[in-house]
Image (cartoon, rainbow, N blue to C red):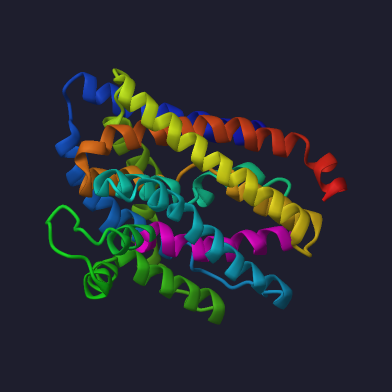
């Protein structure tokens, strides 16, 4: 538990460092937008490849988690579309911030001490699908469902969506990671050393960029938007958690880890994507992400603390 809280406080500290740099005019949103390209094309792909070493022997019954993860990951951003489809820009913003779960940098550190092998496999299977949505899937959903256009004003079609996905270096790295893990292929250490060094900086740079985008001088409209997104996100998480608890035929440990995942914070890539594609909502997205981290710290800490009692009723 102490390690979990330390990880959470470290994330908040990095947010504060980025915000302080902005307040002292050492960097600004335009700098953060440029830095986001370093994340998307260098540090994030390296972080993904760093996890591709070694394989895991999968239990076949757990593979049903893949379609479950797909349905959950697909439905969360759709909430934003159906509620705000009359406002294309805000529709895209809401879809980006309702989709995706921060699993690797949040759930794994929190739950690591309580995870069984079965629970860890469940987490990995869910994260494979989650990665697809975080690393371009949600963004492409927002493109496709926003038929009136996106920034450039051009009509959005399947060709444009496919083009966006083809630009995603992270998607290619995810595919490589799955293949390497499945075949137990090990990348030579002479290649992996620089990859790991660059990948290890990914969490810091992501949180630092979000910190730069933070703005605590919010208007009433900004606060209202953030509260709406928080309510929608965690209401959807609660419904998903109840369905997982009462409908899935898995062990209590697997159910517990899946419930923890749906209460995870919004992916840290949501503000990064907003900074790149919707700069007018960059501050909102960063503030929303920080609020999500704080709320999830409380919720996941409670889940960890009461895990024996929870597993006894699952």
Q: Quadrant of residue 20?
A: top left
Q: Residue at x 24, y 51 (%)?
A: 38
- x%, y% of residue 303? 71, 38
Q: Relative to 190, does residue 102 appear above or below in the rendering?
A: above
Q: Relative to 138, does residue 312 appear above or below in the rendering?
A: above
Q: Is residue 25 left or right of residue 83?
A: left
Q: Residue at x 70, y 45 (%)?
A: 113
The quadrant in which the N terminus is found is top right
Region in magenta? 116-137
- x%, y% of residue 35? 22, 45
- For the residue pair 222 and 2, the one nearer the viewer reads as 222
Q: Residue at x 13, y 62 (%)?
A: 154
Query: Which residue lies most toward the front here?
Result: 86
Q: Quadrant of residue 122?
A: bottom right
Q: Relative to 125, does residue 81 appear above or below in the rendering?
A: above
Q: Residue at x 42, y 68 (%)?
A: 174
Residue 270 visible? The answer is: yes
Q: Is residue 48 left or right of residue 145?
A: right
Magenta stretch: includes residue 123: yes
Q: Quadrant of residue 145?
A: bottom left
Residue 201 visible? The answer is: no
């Amino acid at each position: 538990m102490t390690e979990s809280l330390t990880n959470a406080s470290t994330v908040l500290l990095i947010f504060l460092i980025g915000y302080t740099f902005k307040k002292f005019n050492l960097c600004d949103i335009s700098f953060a937008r440029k830095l986001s390209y370093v994340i998307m094309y260098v540090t994030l792909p390296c972080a993904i490849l760093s996890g591709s070493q070694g394989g895991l022997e999968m239990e076949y019954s757990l593979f049903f988690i893949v379609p479950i993860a797909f349905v959950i990951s697909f439905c969360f951003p759709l909430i934003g579309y159906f509620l705000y489809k009359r406002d294309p820009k805000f529709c895209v913003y809401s879809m980006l911030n309702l989709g995706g779960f921060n699993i690797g940098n949040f759930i794994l550190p929190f739950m690591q001490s309580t995870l069984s092998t079965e629970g860890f496999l469940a987490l990995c299977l869910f994260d494979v699908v989650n990665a697809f949505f975080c690393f371009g899937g949600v963004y492409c959903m927002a493109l496709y469902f926003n038929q009136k256009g996106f920034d450039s004003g051009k009509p959005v079609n399947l060709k444009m969506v496919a083009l966006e996905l083809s630009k995603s270096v992270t998607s290619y790295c995810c595919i490589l990671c799955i293949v390497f893990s499945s075949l137990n292929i090990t990348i030579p250490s002479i290649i992996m050393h620089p990859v790991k060094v660059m990948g290890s900086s990914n969490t810091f740079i992501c949180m630092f960029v979000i910190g730069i985008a933070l703005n605590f001088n919010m208007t009433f409209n900004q606060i209202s938007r953030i509260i709406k997104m928080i309510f929608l996100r965690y209401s959807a998480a609660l419904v998903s958690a109840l369905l997982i608890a009462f409908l899935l035929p898995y062990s209590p440990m697997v159910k517990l880890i899946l419930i923890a995942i749906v209460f995870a914070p919004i992916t840290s890539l949501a503000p990064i994507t907003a900074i790149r594609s919707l700069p007018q909502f960059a501050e909102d997205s960063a503030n929303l992400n920080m609020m999500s981290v704080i709320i999830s710290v409380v919720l996941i800490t409670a889940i960890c603390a009461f895990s024996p009692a929870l597993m006894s009723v699952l």
